Amino acid sequence: MNMAKSFLGKNVNVHLKDGSVIVNVQFSELLRDEFSREAFIRCVAYGKENEFKIPLRSIAWAEQLNLNLFLTCDRN
């Protein structure tokens, strides 16, 4: 829960416990389901407006991205 709070508003790569990776998403909000008491993180894909939720228990770890690297390398 504290890890998710520290990444709110930042772009991250999310590594899930099943081994998959969700690349370059922004954590936008921390949610809690009233009925099951499960915690979720609301994410927005970079450059898109689609939102999706990921249960916190399925996240293994997240790594913060430095978007300056993308912006610098994109200039040709």
Image (tube, rainbow, N blue to C red):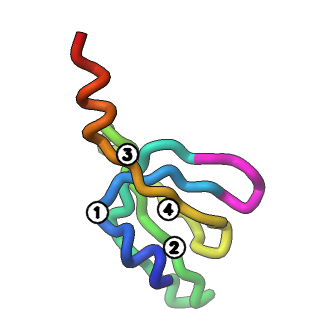
Q: Quadrant of residue 26?
A: bottom left
* Marks 2 and 1 close (CB-CB < 8 Å): no
Q: Which residue was labeled with disc 3?
A: 50
* Marks 1 and 3 close (CB-CB < 8 Å): no
Mark toward the start of the polypeptide (1 vs 3) = 1
Say left or right for 53 vs 56. left
| Residue 33: mark | none
Does 3 appear above or below 45?
below
Q: Residue furthest top?
A: 76
Does 46 appear above or below 13?
above
Residue 24 x, y percent position in the rendering? 43, 44
What amino acid does circle 2 point to? Phe
Say left or right for 72 vs 53. left
Say left or right for 19 vs 68. right
What amino acid does circle 1 point to? Gly
How much space separates mark 2 and mark 4, taking CA atoms? 6 Å
Mark whose residue sits in front, 1 or 4: 1
Q: What kind of element bears circle 1?
A: loop
Q: Which residue was labeled with disc 2?
A: 40
How much space separates mark 2 and mark 1, taking CA atoms? 15 Å
What amino acid does circle 3 point to? Asn
* Marks 2 and 4 close (CB-CB < 8 Å): yes
> What's the magenta region?
16-21
Identity of the residue drawn at 37% across and 45% down: 50
Mark whose residue sits in front, 2 or 1: 1
Q: Within 10 Å of the Cα at label 1, are there few (<14), some (14-19), or many (20+) other Cα atoms?
A: some
How much space separates mark 4 and mark 3, taking CA atoms? 10 Å
* Residue 51 visible within the image: no
Mark toward the start of the polypeptide (2 vs 1) = 1
Residue 67 x, y percent position in the rendering? 30, 42
Magenta residues: mostly which secondary structure? Answer: loop
Is 13 magenta? The answer is no
